[in-house]
Image (tube, helix red, strand yellow):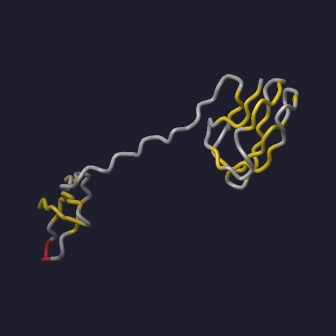
Amino acid sequence: MKKLRVTVDGKAYDVVVEELEGGASPAPVVSSSVAAPPSTPPPAAPPPANKPSAAPGDITSPLSGKVVTIQCVVGASFEAGATLIILEAMKMNTFVISQAAGVVKEILVKEGDSVEEGQPLVSVQ
């Protein structure tokens, strides 16, 4: 048995090989030991984008997607269970439904906008 170090694409691997009789090529034996190559640390992740925070009473996006349809207007009242916005994500529509009755105070997005999970969509009172 011989212990060797093999470098592949800048990564060093410690391997153990066994010599066979008759001068045949050594067969590698699986080894989980990996030597860390000298390298620079990975770049730091970018800071999170400044997302608008939801105020009390805002209806927020349940997922990241694109605004397909806005089914409400400023000043309109709605009942609990009303569909206010339709979002599209991964070719599927998601209906953003009110949990309680209210009045639309402000629409914070427009059709075609990309939205993130938790982003306020509609301000209600």
The residue nearer to you, when weighing 68 against 30, is 68
Task: Identify the image quadrant of the C terminus.
Answer: top right
Quarter of the image with the N terminus in it: bottom left
**x and y, in percent, of residue 88 in the image:** 72, 50
Count of numbered marks: 0
Residue 19 in the image: above or below residue 60: below
Residue 125 vertical placement versus 52 (above, below):
above
Of residue 79 and residue 123, the one placed in the foreground of this image is 123
Q: Residue shown at 23%/60% (left/top)?
A: 11
Identify the residue at the far bottom of this view.
Answer: 23
Residue 5 lies left or right of residue 46; in this view the side is left
Give the residue drawn at x 55%, y 38%.
Answer: 51
Q: Picture coordinates of residue 100 (x, y %)?
A: 81, 24
> In front: 1, or 54?
54
Left or right of 42 on screen, residue 46: right
Residue 6 appears left or right of 80: left
Give how far across and how far down residue 86 sits, in percent: 78, 45
- Provide residue 94's location: percent of width, then percent of height: 75, 44
Q: Is residue 105 above or below residue 26?
A: above
Left or right: where 47 falls relative to 36: right
The residue shown at (15%, 61%) is 5
